[in-house]
Amino acid sequence: MTMHPKTPNSGKTQNSAELVQLRQGRVAANTSAPDTLPERNPGMPFDVRFLDALRRVNLSGLERRASTLTKRRSIKGDNQAAWLLRSLALMDLTTLNSNDTDERVRRLCAKALNPLSRDLRQGLGLGDTVIRPAAVCVYHPFVATAAHALRGSGVEVAAVSTAFPHGLAPLETRIREIELSVAAGATEIDVVIKRGLVFAGRWEELFEEVQAFRQACGDAHLKVILGTGDLATLRNVGLASMVAMMAGADFIKTSTGKESVNATLPVGLVMVRAIRAYHEATGIRIGFKPAGGISTAKASLDWLVLIKEELGREWLEPDLFRFGASSLLTDIERQLEHHLTGRYSAGYRHAMA
Amino acid sequence: MNILERFGAMDYGPAPESRAEADRWIAGRDFSRALFIDGAWTASASGRTFATAEPAQGRHLADISQADASDVDRAVAAAAAALPAWRETSGYGRARVLYALGRAIQRHARLFAVLETIDNGKPIRESRDIDVPLAIRHFIHHAGWAQNLDREAPGMVSVGVCGQIIPWNFPLLMLSWKIAPALAAGCTVVLKPAEFTPLTAILFAEICERVGVPKGVVNIVQGGPEVGEAIVTHSDVAKIAFTGSSEVGKIIRGRTAGSGKQLSLELGGKSPFIVFEDADLNSAVEGLVDGIWFNQGQVCCAGSRLLVQESVAGEFLRKVKARMARLRVGDPLDKNTDIGPLVDQTQLERVRGLVAEGVAQGAACWQPQGELPTSGHFFAPTLVSDLAPANLLAQEEIFGPVLVSMTFRDTAEAIELANNTRYGLAASIWSETIGLALQVAPALKAGVVWINGTNMFDAAVGFGGYRESGFGREGGIEGMQAYLKPAHGGTRSVLEPYTFQVADGAPGDLIDRTPKLFIAGKQVRPDSNYSYGVLDHGGAVVGEAGVGNRKDIRDAVSAARAATRSWGSATAYNRAQVLYYLAENLSARTGEFAQRLQRLTGVEADKAREEVEASIERLFACAGMADKVEGRVHNPPMRAVAMALNEPLGVIGIVTPDGQPLLGLVAMLAPALAMGNTVVVVPSARWPLLATDLYSVIETSDVPAGAINIVTGPGADLAKVLARHDDVDGLWLVTDKATAAEAERESAGNLKRVWTSGGLSVDWNGQDGAIDRFLKRAVEIKNVWVPYGD
């Protein structure tokens, strides 16, 4: 049994018996959860009491945790290589530029299908195991192109939607956009919230919008982008996270990549702690996706450490964690090459997307 | 495990810090010549050595020369010889040395960190990210004090040769806290590291050599308690600075009594960690990790006593346990280790024993699952709950990774529980409500209060305790003051004790006057129901005074304690007005008091009048300063303010001299009152009538009952009772030497803050008798850290 029906390519990419065991273990261990958990987050009625505890976030405490967390853990040698492969497998390989074209998206998909050179795969001893990004993330016009290119690979097609990145189109337009992307073959939808609803404290309205998005998604998974760089306080981040989860988000996601401040570790802490609170209350696990500005292998490890420490190993699977990244992959390739050869690599040695 | 298996497991794996350089350093040293005296490496006179071992492995590291009393003699002699030149070195000159030390430690930061971890067992993350950077900061910060002291502390000079004894829990950092301010002030030092952790002090001494610290300015002797004792009792040492256990601190207090040595003690703690229901609970959990699982809990200010509000206790403890399960116990040189071994087998056994005893007393003990390393002195992180305040574990300092937890119902109970301890070093308050946090902070008996934080330190922010956690501060201007003394104290003479006979006859006045004692705002008969005759300078009986005894002191202290609530919490403006009013009412009776002075002491009329007027002036001055001796706001290098608040000591016993009996009394009484203390005064036994005449002045001046209590009688006896009273917070004596020494000795019971004039008179117009000296003495500095941001 898995909680999420679509587990992108994880079943292929690792010992599946182990994964099943892990999942069963975590369900069994959670005594507060009902016997059979729903396959996806069904959401719940809007309940303002859920927001209370989230109002209390201490910025200094969070910053201290974030800064010491990465100093408390260090990953070396073969473990580091393994963790970098994990970063790769948890990646939504992304292109979200105004000048994107079908051809550009096809190139990106080709890279997603074949992210590591043969030398690297052999050197790392991957054998027949294929490790690929979890999804390719594009604007709506390129969904069909990506779906075609990735068909049968297990790599998901994610579409940013609802008037990304600002979210300020009429609700009906935004909902329609989701429906069209799903119809075009998107299996994951990354929506943005109207940040103004947060500032106004119009939580129920935000709740209803996200609920509507969820409905429009159908079977596609819903990732809710909070635009944390715009939200001004970590308190707002925590509250918006909880509202999105109550409304049925499968993932909550930090940023569009277009705000002036992208995913930061303190923001991540607030969001993963909201996820933890939701899990404790409902037994349901929500995924987390930091996005924007995560471009180095080292930074990706910091995020993995944060997740492992705050949520646990079970969250380090593609159905519960993603990076939104465009240039991270190249740095991972460079670091993996360094791991194998002991020589520092150059970007041009690795195939571009 | 191949990479794919690791990809599935997602374990951290080992990440060892290299020890090669540190091992090379150790291998390259002749530790049989490890005493650093007068700029040279020498063997001990006895040739004896002691072993230092590695806590993580129990492995032998080195045999270090063990000093004895004769080596301490040599070291003190070297320090004394170096003192004049170092004291005369310009502030700039001293600043350059301190700066060079800071930078040199920085250049060798990793070697210091690795050595510290090998020798002490603390995780490399801590020695690398906390101990060593703070040590560097301390030297560089104090370079600034050295250069600017003339302006910041005018009229002060270094106290002289300092004996400094440091513990094993932060060897390099404690060395820095001791040596940096001493050198900045112009003192020379003899420092003794702890026997468990001698190595980083040796590396530091090498750096002293390299950067050109003048010979004899820094001397480092190695060894155990007997070496410490030789330092403490050495007659040429002017000041002792000690960090360590309260038990040893009390012994040092006793051993230095009457020696005239200045003393600062930074001792143990049982610091409360208070979590209110409106706290960011997740951040508070991390605070606990930094509080009690920092340095294996071997931290004097560890947040070892969790007080959590009932309404969130279940949820919070659940979070704590979940967090504990992720703590990694193991090799301290591994960068992924959160908790290393305890420093020594003896400590491990001590912690085990205490926990076992606490459990036997009914406490519940929880530890996360997991194997401990088989070698080394490891103890798993432990949570003790279901704890009554009476349980041993709620009261004793455990000095290990053991958190004890209790719940409280409301704010008042939280404060009461927090203060229900003999210690008073630090406290943490967790609440997102600024009003609540800032209400609780002043109510806690602790020298350091962290709001929504824990274990934050900075060279600019004073650190030190209330109560039996010691006295004196390290860091900041207050830390500097502890290494300075007035350059010109004033003219002084030796005081003699005064003894009297219980009187059997009094002079027949027109109307008989019966001076009683003044306790709790009332004139009361002495418990003994004896009086003694007060003689004038010519030996004629001019009146009688009550013979107070220990019961009168007991009653006076309890009245003073009760009055700390009204007087201590009165506004400074309010206290100022009462003191002005006292001055006003005394002024109205100038003639009468002058006559009394003249009659008793035999001074000329104009001198007597001068003394009364000087007393009134001093009351006026103290009234004026009541609302002006304010704290500071520090800006440590983080987004936080640290507010150094001046708080009253509490109850102060004051024993006043015979000479200038009115001025002497007022000069000690007024500053104590101005700062919000309540007092128990034992006035001059020879001429107590000035004090008894004051009763009616006090009664007409709106002084709250119990704020001033006066007990006449045998000064030396009453001083001793005050010294032995554990509800007295401070004791000031201008008495003969024997009385002063006895009081210092007896004060060790609760480590009350004792100041004596060393058996000499005080020149009330000199620097020693100046108002500001007493105002400073009348307050305890509490540093409240407030990290902020939203």
Image (cartoon, coloured by chain):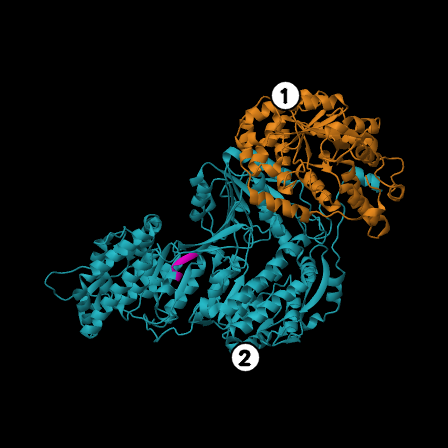
Rendered location of residue B733, percent (x, y): 36, 65
Q: Is residue B631 above or below residue B324?
A: below
Residue at screen point 66% across, 45% down: A69
* Kind of residue indicated by mark 1: Glu
Q: Is residue A261 above or below residue B580?
A: above
Q: Nearer the viewer, residue B269 or B17?
A: B17
Magenta residues, as a range? B776-780
**Label 2, on which residue?**
B81
* Kind of residue indicated by mark 2: Ala
Rendered location of residue B746, percent (x, y): 42, 62
- Give me the chain that's orange: A
| Residue B175 seen in this snapshot | yes
The question of residue B298 being in magenta is answered with no
Q: Nearer the viewer, residue A198 or B122?
A: A198
In terms of secondary structure, where does tag 1 sit? Answer: helix
Packing grade of label 2 (10 A; few <14, some 14-19, many >=20) is some
Q: Nearer the viewer, residue A170 or B543?
A: A170
